[in-house]
Image (cartoon, grey):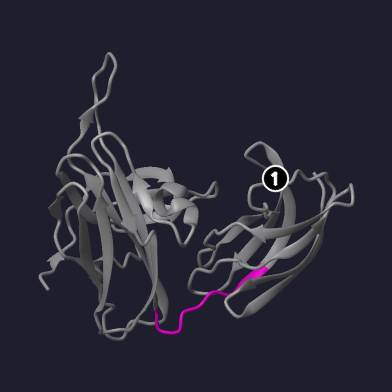
Amino acid sequence: MPIASSKSLIRASRARLGWACTSVLACLPVVSQAQGFAAYITPPRFEVRATPGEPLRQVLEIQHVGQQAGRFRIYTSDWTLNPDNSVTFSTDLAADSCRPWVAIEKRELVIEPGARYRYRFEITPPPGTTARECRFALMIEGLDAARAQGSLDLPVGGRIGVVVYAVVGDAAPLLEIAATRVAMVDGKPTAVVEVRNRGNAHGRLEGFVNGTDASGARFEMAPADLPILSGETRGVAITPVAEEGKPTPEIRFPLTIKGNLEWGKNRLPLDASFSP
C-alpha cells in the first residue's frame, strides 16, 4: 500500500463539533453539501486501539455525490474541544501531537460522480510509547470551489473533519460526576451534569435515567453523546428521549433525575434535583 507523509497543511479553522463528527453521533455518515463540494464520509469518527511499534491500518470511505468529478485534498489536523463544544482545528503541531505517527495514502484525489473511494491511513505509535490516547482529525477538503452569489462574488468550498481516537496500551477514561446544574441549551433550561475525567483517554456517558418534573410527569432521559477528554471537566446535558413521531417533552422545573449513567462497564449513580 503506497503511504505518504501527512505534511500538506493549511490554516487553522474553527467549526462546530457536529460539523466535525455529525453531532458526535456514532452511526450516521458525515455529509457536506457546500457549493462546490458534495460528499458523504463514513464512518463519522474512529475509536480504535493501537499497539506501540505496530501499524494500525484503517479505511475511510468517501462518496462523491456531485454532478461532476470532484477533486479533494486530505490532510491531518490537531483539534481542541472548546467549553461551548465547538472544535478548533489547527494544522500547527500541538505540544503532545501524535500526527507524526500518522501516514496517509495520498494528499489529493479525484472521484467521479456517484463513485466511492476507500481512503487508507495508518497509525504507528513508536515502540515504547506509554499508555495514552492519540487524537487527531482527518480533513477532507473540496478543491473545486464554486462562486458565491452576491456583490462580492467570493469563492466558497467545503470540508469535513473526521475525528480519530486511538487508544495506546491500557489507556482508559475515569469518569466522575463533579457537580449538577441547570443551563440554557438552545434557549431552554436543561439539566446538566459536570463530568470530570481523571483517566488518560476520552470517555462518553451512556444509558438511561428517570426524570420527574414539577407537574409529576415522568420522562426517560439520556445524556448527550459528548466526549469528555482526559484531564477535563465537561458539562453534559441530560434531556428527555422523544418517542418516535412525537415532539420532545416539555419539562417544568424543578426536575428530579434518578438512575445510573454508564461509561464502558462502569456506572455513575445519579440522584439529583435540578432547578433554574
Quarter of the image with the C terminus is: top right
Tell me the magenta residue range. 168-176
Element under disc 1: strand
Horizontal side of 110 relative to 181 (left or right) equals left
- Between 137 and 117, the residue placed more toward the observer is 117
Residue 130 in the image: above or below residue 40 = below
- How far from the left and from the top, in percent, is residue 52? 30, 84
Which SS type dominates the magenta stretch? Answer: loop
Query: What residue appears at the point 20 percent right and 59 percent down from the top-left corner?
Result: 117
| Foreground of the two, 142 or 4 | 142
Q: Amino acid at mark 1?
A: Ala
Q: In this figure, which residue is indicated by the disc labeled 1?
A: 183
Image position, residue 173 (x, y; %): 54, 74
Q: Residue furthest left?
A: 2
**Residue 108 against residue 230 in the figure, above or below:** above
- Give the image quarter of residue 218: bottom right
Which residue is located at x 34 percent, y 62 percent?
A: 136
Q: Residue furthest top?
A: 151
Residue 106 at x, y percent in the picture: 14, 60
- Horizontal side of 273 relative to 37 (left or right) equals right
Position of residue 23 relative to residue 222, above or below, is above
Nearer to me, 85 or 62: 62
